[in-house]
Image (cartoon, rainbow, N blue to C red):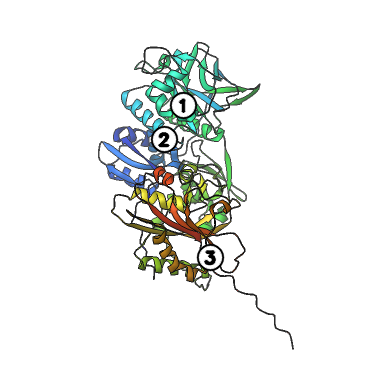
Amino acid sequence: MFLGYLTLKYSVMFMATLSFNKKELDRFITKELPFEKVANAFEMLGMPVDKANEEEIVADITNDRIDMFTVEGAGRAIGQFMGLIGSKEYKVEASELVLNVENVSVRPYAMAFVARGLKIDDEMIRSLIMAQEKIHDTFGRKRKKIAIGIHDVDKVTGPLYYKAFKDISFIPLDTDKEMSVQQILKNHPKGQEYAHIFDNASEYPMFMDSKGVLSFPPIINSERTRLTEKTVNLLFDVTGTSETAVRIVLNVFATAMQERGAKIENIKINKSGMIQDSLVFERKEKLSLKFANKLLGLKLKDQDAISLLDRMGMKANAEKGGLIISVPPYRSDIIHEVDFIEDLAVAYGYENFKPALPKLFTTGAVSEQTKLDYKARDILVSLGFIEINSWTLTNEEMTGKAFMNKESVTIKNPRTSDFTIFRTDLTPSVLQTLAENKTKGLPLKIFEVGRVSNPDGKCRTRLCCAIMSENSSFSDIVSVFNEVKGFAKVFERYVEEEKVKPRLEHLIDGRFILIKKQEDMKAESIGWCGEIHPKVLENFRLEYPVAMFEFDLSPSVPGKTKRMKKK
């Protein structure tokens, strides 16, 4: 019987909460709808609604659909899902402006476009700034990965430049006096907030025209190109550390402005003599309908699939062997065939799928690892411990706080700064859970049975147990370890600190032991048991001592059986 319960809090950010003006949303849906229908459409698209009435819709938008961070994109998605508008084609014209990109090592990528003929009012500015800031905080990793600048293009004199300076002066937005880069980083509110992005940097990126600085990305724009009620033509610039991410965000805003009726002009990029477009809208992919039907358990025909994809904003044509799909430029979440299949399922409606028993008959059994996991849970719960279940993905900041930075599997294109690596230890997650729940009352006794990975991607199960109280000590945690070491077939080994390599910086010297497997006493240790170092406790803002153990929880390797001789 499973006795542990997840009752403690572990905070993480997956979604961004956005507030949409209902009338503005209806404009891009192309029809005034009851707020209940609009809220239901958000829910069907996988975006939970927190509040809905005739004036406002508040929804949680996932990071993989940043096009719906804009009111134009959210309205378009709902209008298409409800069959009010079909898939769209987006066209761009060539701009007279050229962006000359030089070598900017700290932030190497910059792209831009112009949107002409806009009617700018307070509601548009509100929704535009909301989308800009939400993308900054989530997809942009608080401006470190990407940052967006918006300017009045009629105040810009080409050509454009993106280059690095050791220092330069301009008048930042919302000020009336010229400031140098160092003054902005030390004295301007935005400079103080984001100065850490340029830790150890000797040069700083500047987005400029022939007259001077337009913006100091990702910190602040220039006052010279401030938007006013007379602004009708906008210049968008996006800079960052990932070329793909920069282009994704640029496409999102370009298509959003086209939804408002703007004429979009593509600014050419000149980088070391190589010319390329900022906006690239053309993309076609292939989908095997046979594969889609197999995964979904449906019998969709070509026209059925084409109609369903149209409701998700994608235009498709049937060709021999499958469908050729034009992927909208704002759909950055389409990576694999299964992403099209997921959209087919959403448009078809999960409520319309009929349950069916599997045709393949199989038998199963509880694995030795699972039996061991259950045994650990039973013993620790009986000792008054509460089980937690934290994320297998974490980030370098979290492991660094625990003094447990190790080589690990990194996520190539993470959607959020909270999840950038696969964890190598459970300890940082357990310490974070203690920090989130330190007001629950003492003592706090928690444990986790979870998966970790080595740098090669090989996963294994580990057991981590922690006690936090006014006087928790080495003897307290050792007594708990003694209860589990027998069934886990491990034993403790006392080792002098100077002989432990690599050094266990997260533990107090002289107050820990190493843990080894019984089957291989000569092998390296598989874990440890001891008191957490005060510096680690300070990093997690823990005011009381913490005693912990963590080790590999793996079943015993069965002995080799002798092969029987044939008679």
In front: 33, or 41?
A: 41
In the image, residue 488 above or below residue 174: below
Q: Nearer the viewer, mark 3 or mark 2?
A: 3
Q: Amino acid at mark 1?
A: Pro
Q: Earlier in the sequence, mark 1 or mark 3?
A: 1
Residue, disc 2: 137
- Residue 274 x/y as whole percent: 65, 24
Q: Counting other residues with Cα less than 10 Å from the Cα at mark 3, is it few (<14), some (14-19), or many (20 or more)?
A: some
Q: Earlier in the sequence, mark 1 or mark 2?
A: 2
Q: Does 232 sit left or right of 206 as displayed?
A: left
Secondary structure beneath label 2: helix
Q: Earlier in the sequence, mark 3 or mark 2?
A: 2
In the image, residue 97 above or below residue 521: above
Calculate the distance from the C-alpha at mark 3 to the C-alpha at mark 2: 40 Å
Q: Amino acid at mark 2?
A: Asp
Calculate the distance from the C-alpha at mark 1 to the C-alpha at mark 3: 47 Å
Residue, disc 1: 218
Residue, disc 3: 554
Considering the image in quadrants, where does the C terminus appear? bottom right
